[in-house]
Amino acid sequence: MKNKYQPARQLEEVLNQLEGKINAALVLIEQLQKENEALRQQLAELKKVNAEAMTRIDNILDRIDALL
């Protein structure tokens, strides 16, 4: 009778391992989504800073041209 239940135990073990891997993958996906959102926000902020810097540079160049 031992052999009769052996495949069921092995299958259960494999399914438990698979469940663990799936749960780990879901946790990783959630972490990556949060990181991605943070990076998107950081990129948007840096684009804004860059645009402001470009405007200041343009203004400075206009002043230099006016002096020349």
Image: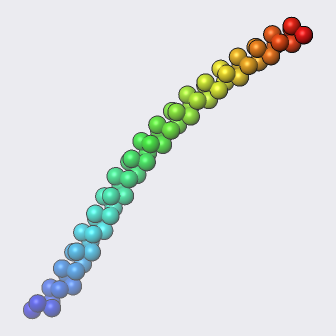
The residue drawn where x is 56% and y is 34% is 43
Q: Identify the image quadrant of the C terminus.
A: top right
Q: How is the image coloured?
A: rainbow
Quadrant position of residue 47:
top right
> Between residues 44 and 22, which one lies in front from this camera angle?
44
Image coordinates for residue 52, horizontal then vertical, percent: 65, 20
| Residue found at the very far left of the displayed protein | 1
Quadrant position of residue 24:
bottom left
Image coordinates for residue 48, horizontal then vertical, percent: 61, 25
Q: How many marks?
A: 0
- In the image, residue 39 sits, relative to residue 25, either above or below, namely above
Image coordinates for residue 11, horizontal then vertical, percent: 24, 78
Say left or right for 66 vs 58.
Answer: right
Q: Identify the image quadrant of the N terminus.
A: bottom left
Say left or right for 19 vs 2.
Answer: right
> Between residues 50 and 31, which one lies in front from this camera angle?
50
Say left or right for 54 vs 12.
Answer: right
Image coordinates for residue 39, horizontal then vertical, percent: 50, 38
The residue drawn where x is 28% and y is 63% is 20
> Between residues 24 and 52, which one lies in front from this camera angle?
52
- In the image, residue 29 sits, relative to residue 48, either above or below, namely below
- In the image, residue 66 sits, relative to residue 33, either above or below, namely above
| Residue found at the very far top of the displayed protein | 67
Quadrant position of residue 8:
bottom left
Say left or right for 58 vs 20.
Answer: right
